[in-house]
Image (spheres, rainbow, N blue to C red):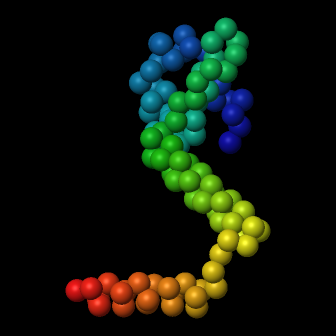
Amino acid sequence: MKYSEKIKPITFLQNHTFEIMQEVTNTTAPVIITYNGEAKLVIQDIKVYEEQKNAMTLLKLLAQSTESMKKGRYKQIRNSFNSVRERLDNVHEKI
């Protein structure tokens, strides 16, 4: 996809709102809106936006996990399961 083909001035948006909405929905490609020759807005399908937000959240979690691993802040999986079992045993004893 070439973003250069999806750049429109704000007056085009004002005069062709419905067509832009259909284009964005049908192609899932964003449309970039310019004002005074500068890119100011990106119009994008809500489903694509949500997918991108979810992907960014996962990437952020992955980056945080990688950083934790580098700093040695992790447990071996066996130790993690043992900790969970101990907590569950403690809960069962209190019941």
Q: Is residue 35 above or below residue 62?
A: above
Q: Nearer the viewer, residue 39 or 63?
A: 63
**Going 77% across and 68% down the picture, which residue do you hit?**
70
Report how many numbered discs are placed on residues in the image: 0
Is 44 placed left or right of 8 in the picture?
left
Q: Percent x, y for residue 65?
A: 65, 65
Q: Percent x, y for residue 46?
A: 45, 41
Q: Is residue 21 visible?
A: yes
Q: Is residue 47 above or below residue 39?
A: below
**Going 29% across and 90% down the picture, which residue do you hit?**
93
Q: Nearer the viewer, residue 77 or 89?
A: 89
Q: Percent x, y for residue 95?
A: 22, 86
Is 52 placed left or right of 95 in the picture?
right
Q: Is residue 92 above or below residue 33?
A: below
**Residue found at the far front of this picture:** 94
**Going 56% across and 48% down the picture, which residue do you hit?**
52
* Rendering quarter of residue 62: bottom right
Is 95 placed left or right of 13 in the picture?
left
Q: Is residue 66 visible?
A: no
For the N terminus, the image quarter is top right
Q: Nearer the viewer, residue 22 or 77?
A: 77
Q: Percent x, y for residue 12?
A: 54, 15
**Residue found at the far left of this picture:** 95
